[in-house]
Amino acid sequence: MGRVQLEEFVAGYLGGASSVIVGHPLDTVKARLQAGQGYGSTFNCIFTIYRNENIAGFFKGLSFPLASIAIYNSVVFGIFSHAHRFISQYRNTSQRHPPDLIDLTFASMLAGCVSVGIGGPVDLVKIKLQMQTQSATSDVVSLTHSTTLRHYQTTYKGPIHCVNCILRKEGLLGMYRGSGAMILRDIPGYCLYFIPYIYLSEWLKLECHTTPSALSVWLAGGIAGAISWGTATPMDVVKSRLQADSLYNRKYRGVKDCITQSYCNEGIQVFFKGITVNAIRGFPMSAAMFLTYELSLRAMKTSKESN
C-alpha cells in the first residue's frame, strides 16, 4: 500500500509540473484580466503585456508555482486517489466500471478542501507577483497627446521576499487571503474536474484496451479542464481580486463585499472576466496534467512488476 501511495504522489508531482509550464502564460493573462484594469479584451491584454514587458511578462511568478504547485498537485491527486479507493471499498462499490458517481463526488470534494490548505498561499504569492505592474506610481503625459508613459513600481523582488513581506505585515492569516472564495471555487471545481475526466476516459477507451489510450487520456483531461475552469470563473474572479487587493490598497472586506462591490461597479459581466482564457488555458493544462500523471504512473507500476 505504501508503495502504491508513493507512486501516485510522484505521478501527481510530475503532472503538476507539466501543467504549470504549459499553462502559466495564459494564467498571467487571466489574472490581469480579472484583477487588473484597462485591458479590455483578451487579445488586448496579451498585446499590452507583450508590448510593455516582452515575453518575460507572461512568466512572472513562474518559479514559485513551478516549485510548489507540483507538490500541491501531488497531494491533491494522491488524496483523491486514496479517498476514492477507501470510499468505494467502504461502500462496496470498488468493482463498478465506470466508478460510482457518489464515490467520485465525495473524493473530489475532499481533494477540493485539501487543495485550499496547500494551494491558498501558493496562489496568493503567484497572483501578487503577476499583478506587480498593476499599480502605477505616476502617469506622465509624453511628447504627443496620444501617448502616455507609465512608471511602474516593483514591490516584491521574488517569491521568498513576497512571503516574508506578507508574513511580516499580515501574519500567517495573511497567507490565506481569499481562501473563502477559493473553497467556493475548488470544491465544486474539483467535482467538475475529476468526474468528467473519469467518465470521458472510460467512454473514449477503445474496446480492445483495458486502459484508456494516451490520446483518450489527453482528450478527456483537456475537456475536463475546460469544463472545470470555465464554470469556476465567477469565484475565480472574486478570489483573484481578494488576493491582489492588499498589494497596494485594501478595497474588499471579504468575499461578500467583493461580490457586492464588483457587481455594483461593473455589472454581472465582471464575474465572467477571463472565462475565455480560463476555458482555453484549462484544456492544455489539464491535458498535460492527466497525460503526464497516467503515463508516469503506468511506467512506475510496470517497472515495479518487472523487478
Image (spheres, helix red, strand yellow):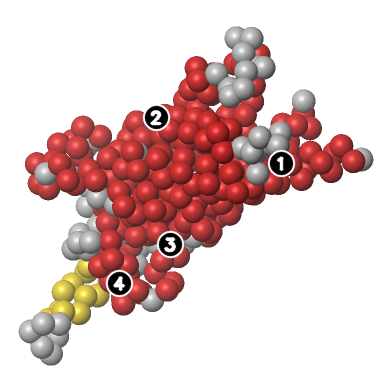
Q: Which residue is mark 2?
A: 188
Amino acid type, residue under disc 3 in the picture? Pro
The answer for how far apart the CA atoms under marks 4 and 2 are is 33 Å
Question: Depth-wise, is mark 3 or mark 1 nearer the camera?
Answer: 1
Of the image marks 4 and 1, the number of the one nearer the N terminus? 4
The reply to whether residue 83 is visible in this rendering is: no
Kindly indicate whether the residue at mark 2 contacts the one at mark 4 (C-beta within 8 angstroms).
no
Instruction: Classify mark 1: residues with Cα within 10 Å, few (<14), some (14-19) or many (20+).
Output: many
Q: Which residue is mark 4?
A: 47
Farthest residue in the front direction? 207
Checking the image for residue 297, the label placed there is 1
The answer for how far apart the CA atoms under marks 4 and 1 are is 39 Å
Q: Which residue is mark 3?
A: 25
Which element carries disc 2, helix, strand or loop? Answer: helix
Farthest residue in the top direction? 91
Of the image marks 4 and 2, the number of the one nearer the N terminus? 4
Position of residue 184 in the picture relative to residue 56 (left or right): left
Q: Residue at x 82, y 41 (%)?
A: 302
